[in-house]
Amino acid sequence: MNNQNFRPVILTIILYAVLALVFTAVSMVSRPSGTLVGVLRPLDEIPAHVFLLAAGGLALGFLASLGLRRFDIWLVILIPSVVVLTDLDHLPSALGLVQAVRPVHSFVFLAVSFVAVAMIIRRLDLSVAVMSGFFAHLGVDTGIFPPLSPLSFSYYHLGPFQVEFLAAASACALAAGLLGRRRTR
Ligand SMILES: [Zn+2]
């Protein structure tokens, strides 16, 4: 098994999860009164939704391996992890707290995560893999999103862009693999 990606991938997953929790916490404070607040989807729908997200992420992980031209278990693990961890922002409502709807499903969060992974983990390929997982999540979720959270809590229906998000997720997965290949050569 190839282990050279083990550490950076695990660190990237931890960094992404921490950033998601920080953004969620910030949104609890910065959310103006009158912001849409949400509750969890019905509990019996969660496993199927998470499974769909993880399966999509797994497919993208294999696509990244295609770009890399070798199977890399850590790259395959990273993308579905990011896809699923994006829903960490439901944690307050799971704990019974009032919270804004989907504070981490935001392009501001994506930009911060992208830059943080590039600067802290120092791996552009992993930044692009994170972007792939994030876009995949938006491609599977339905309903309303706050694209500029936590700067603005205006909500939009992004459903009409699902195909574009999934295309972007695929392109990013492939690009992450290609960038990884270039780095190891
Ligand atoms: Zn979601």
Image (tube, rainbow, N blue to C red):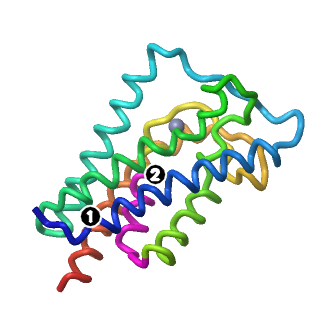
- Locate the C terminus and report the quarter of the image it occupies: bottom left
Q: Give yes or no for residue 71 being in the magenta stretch.
A: no
Q: Can you see residue 168?
A: no
Q: Residues within 10 Å of mark 2 (few under 14, many from 20)?
A: many
Residue 108, above or below 92: below
Horizontally, is 95 left or right of 67 in the view?
A: right
Looking at the rendering, the stretch of residues picked out in magenta corresponds to 122-135
- Nearer to us in this view, 72 or 176: 72
Q: Residues within 10 Å of mark 1 (few under 14, many from 20)?
A: some
Amino acid marked by disc 2: Phe
- Locate the N terminus and report the quarter of the image it occupies: bottom left
Q: Are marks 2 and 1 in contact (CB under 8 Å)?
A: no
User: Which comes sooner in the sequence, label 2 or label 1?
Assistant: 1
For label 1, being within 8 Å of ligand 1 is answered no
Q: Give yes or no for residue 131 being in the magenta stretch.
A: yes
Query: Of helix, strand and loop, which one carries label 2?
Result: helix
Amino acid marked by disc 1: Phe
Q: Main secondary structure of the magenta part?
A: helix
Q: Can you see residue 5?
A: yes
What's the residue at 82%, 48% (across, down)? Answer: 30
Query: Of helix, strand and loop, which one carries label 1?
Result: helix
What's the residue at 60%, 48% (across, down)? Answer: 21
What's the residue at 59%, 31% (across, down)? Answer: 143
Horizontally, is 47 left or right of 177 in the view?
A: right
From the image, tell me which residue sits under label 2. 135
Give percent across and percent down for residue 36.
Answer: 77, 32
From the image, tell me which residue sits under label 1. 6
What's the residue at 42%, 50% (across, down)? Answer: 82
Looking at the rendered structure, which numbered label has been put on residue 139? Answer: none
